Image: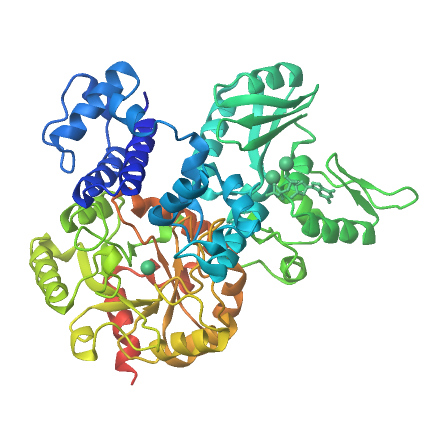
Amino acid sequence: MTATEAVTIFERIALLMELKEENPFKIRAYRTGAEVVENFPGPIMQLAEKNELAGIKGLGEALRDKLHEMATTGGLGFYDKLREGFSDDFFELFEVQGLGPKKIKVLHETFGISSVADLKRVCESGEVAKLAGFGSKTVVKLLESLAFRETHAQEFRGDQVAPLAEEILGMLRLHPEITRVSVAGSYRRGKETVHDLDFLVATREPKLVIEDFVGIPQVQSILGQGETKASVLLRNGLQCDLRAVSNAQFPFALQYFTGSKEHNVTLRQRALDRGLSLNEYGLKPVEGSNTVEPEVMEEGDIYRALGLSWIEPELRENSGEIQLAEKQPLPKLVELSNLRGVFHNHTTWSDGVASLEAMAEEAQELGLQYLGIADHSKSSFQANGLDAVRLLKQVEEIRALNATYDGGHFKIFAGSEVDILKDGSLDFDDEVLSQLDYVVASVHASFTLPEAEMTKRIIKAMENPYVTMLGHVSGRLLLQRPPYAVDIAAVIEAAAATGTIIELNASPWRLDMDWRWWKLAKEKGVKCSINPDAHSPRGLQDIFYGIRAARKGWLTREDIINCLPLSKVDEFLRAKFLSR
Ligand code: DGT
Ligand code: CA
Ligand code: CA
Ligand code: ZN
């Protein structure tokens, strides 16, 4: 059994125990266990097999024994018994927004529902609305959640595709008959969700390459297979297309299949205006024109031949990039290596799984100069939010830890992710906030306010001089929960007026504020902070997704405060407060 499978089993045990209203501490132990296994930096299943798990924090004896059983037998008796009568489909119910274990339990016991399809049926029939604790409002919400899920059923988030994309690219690169490889399509453009992955290879042996591709272990079924292309379905349901072209065609095919469609349409028209015809095979003079055929060795040559500067794939959305590239080089987009630190991270003080020390260690391991901690505040009780006493104790601990970093080469910034309450006031008063290095203010409750009220609430929070940055502005969870109603343009306006930074939450679930708004924010002079919102050491690596979104939003290192070195960022964090 793989570690990933063991993680799923631990998570499902926690869900089933919740359903059966078992001891909350036991439930939490399984959740923590799942996180520990998921984040373990070594071959944990091999250790489990040899019974060498003692001493790993967060794994008690009961969980160690269960891992040993899974590693040696490939199954778990305890789990099999617990889940008797529950199919795999049943667990999808827990992903439906607005449905917790208590409600699932009632629905299961009353109507025997055991899948999302069952849920939809009983909601539509009107039976659910008659149940105590449900009511017609709940049912409307549930049906909305279900509709939202259905609309996005064929899409995948970055975390569901990036590891697979990189793995498959790696395999293709090693193929002896392949000379050039790239991923194209929406993934290459850095979209926040994708429908499928498009791979492109240059080869003289397309048939052989296609045969090898459809045979890779990640493939579950073949949707189509021809001489030069194939479509497959991977185990997680993700579709992957592969096209094999000649070395000479490669640049044209790469440009074409990277898209977007709209970008391509405008580009093709531009080519026509110059007497050239552009498609996935080439860039040729149209009949009767006296234009000479440009020499194209790589993708950049196509843009050059059309009188344009280079356009990064992330910018190819037909949102003004072609017009600008006609006049000047486009902005040099931020890169992962430009980041010097990260703000907005959680520890075991609230709902994170790792200690301050462990988070700081990992940040240093990633080559960062600073780590901002921002654990939840008290109103987020479900996330074990800190009250003022605990917060100030944490600040003290951070200061003590900072004193141990020689020469000041690394620093932890003490912050808080303070809840924006329903009326726009904050979960801590100014006296407490003034003792922090920085403050992230976020909405975590009362999502259903009307747009005007929600906007007012958020702007009020930004007007507080201690609020350094605004967290996940829309509250969306990609593919799961739509954004709440808020006037983002007005929020950007207020950020500019108050000198508040806006976060680009880098979690692949959020990527919030959305890339479509950053161009406007940048024009208004609003700064961005790319925040992993990490709840574990591994979570810090979500900056990878944040960088992709920032690039898609046209951002350069100058727009992003956590590209500043430690020596400069401190001052910047205080700038808003000092300017008043
Ligand atoms: P998605 O839906 O996330 O897979 O988005 P894309 O952009 O990857 O779309 P996909 O996989 O259907 O096609 C990949 C690229 O191929 C697309 O971005 C542009 C190009 N393409 C596909 N069909 C057409 C078309 O009918 N016209 C043009 N101009 N380009 C196309
Ligand atoms: Ca695609
Ligand atoms: Ca495709
Ligand atoms: Zn948050």
Along the line of sight, the residue nearer the viewer: 494 or 183: 494
Is 429 or 170 nearer to us in this picture?
429
Q: Where is residue 71? Give x, y as percent.
A: 25, 19
Please, is residue 143 above or below residue 492 in the view?
A: above
Assign the C terminus to one quadrant of the image.
bottom left
Please identify the residue farthest to the right as the structure is shown.
288
Q: Is residue 451 left or right of residue 282?
A: left
Residue drawn 61% across the image and 21% down it? 222
What number of labels is visible? Answer: 0
**Quarter of the figure that contains the N terminus:** top left
Q: Residue at x 35, y 74 (%)?
A: 422
In the rendered image, is residue 79 in sight?
yes
Asked if 333 appears above or below 5 in the picture, the reply is: below
Q: Looking at the image, in which quadrant does ligand 1 appear?
A: top right
Q: How is the image coloured?
A: rainbow
**Residue 482 visible in the displayed image:** no
* For residue 71, above or below residue 269: above
Q: Residue furthest bottom?
A: 580
Q: Is residue 263 left or right of residue 52?
A: right
Residue 348, position in %: x, y? 18, 50
Task: Please name whichever residue, 207 or 5, is drawn nearer the observer in this view of the structure.
Answer: 5
Residue 558 at x, y = what percent? Answer: 41, 63
Q: Nearer the viewer, residue 112 or 391?
A: 112
Q: Position of residue 66 (x, y in %)?
A: 21, 25
